[in-house]
Image (tube, rainbow, N blue to C red):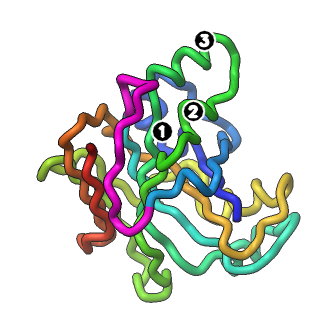
Amino acid sequence: MKIFCIGRNYAEHALELNNPIPDEPVVFMKPPGALLVNDKPFYHPSFTSEIHYEVELVIRICKNGKHIQPEFAARYYDKVAVGIDLTARDLQSKLKSKGLPWELAKAFDHSAPISKFVPISKLKGKMDFSLEKNGEIVQKGNPESMIHSFEDLIVFLSKYFTLQMNDMIFTGTPAGVGKLEVGDQFRAFLNDRPMLNCEIR
């Protein structure tokens, strides 16, 4: 199983971090150990003092494919979840300043809390998602605001990687990211349906 992540896929988020809007998807990966499932708490690691939350839709690949053509891309995913890409922003800034990869800031253990997947066929085309921090909505988004659509991402990734069943794609975060603190409680929603709870300890 591979976990692909897409950076800067919402224009407002790229701008809030003073990043250019990319012409092509910005891709990085997380290992399976980054997943945090079943609403387990997240324990703040000691190597960073500035972890940011980034809520995202996550699509699941449902069949193997390579060099997937645009007209067939929609056949390669069937379920969606809501996930949180946790980023050690202080460490990321340090790595970026040296021209180094982001893995230490993005791929650490349990840096990807994720809900259960639901069939896209049951959502009737609507996929509004949001993140609540301590009872207040801090992020909202939907796929229509993405720079690169689900299908675009599948086509692009499949040029470089063989996509396999149960691979996941974290598809990018909307504006509103911010710092989390020990004691925070996060809830993520899909079409106003509670999908994910995550307590920070």
Which type of secondary structure does the marked residue at label 1 adopt?
Answer: helix
Rendered residue at 20%/50% (across/down): 185
Whole-angstrom CA distance, mark 2 to mark 1, is: 6 Å
Dot 3 falls on a residue whose secondary structure is: helix
Up the image or down, 124 lies above or below 5; here it is below
Does label 2 or label 3 sit earlier along the sequence?
Answer: 2
The correct choice, above or below, for 83 with respect to 163 in the image is above
Q: Percent x, y for residue 26? A: 65, 40
Please tell me which residue is depicted at 87% across the width and 64% down the height of the picture: 67
Magenta-highlighted residues: 37-51
Q: Amino acid at mark 3?
A: Ser
Residue for badge 2 = 21
Residue 131 numbered tag: none
Classify 10 Å Cα crowding around label 3: few (below 14), some (14-19), many (20 and above). Answer: few
Disc assigned to residue 11: 1
**Neighbour class for label 1 at 10 Å: few (<14), some, many (≥20)?**
some
Give yes or no for residue 45 being in the magenta stretch: yes
Mark 1–mark 3 Cα distance, whole angstroms, equals 22 Å
- Tags 2 and 1 in contact by the CB under 8 Å rule? yes
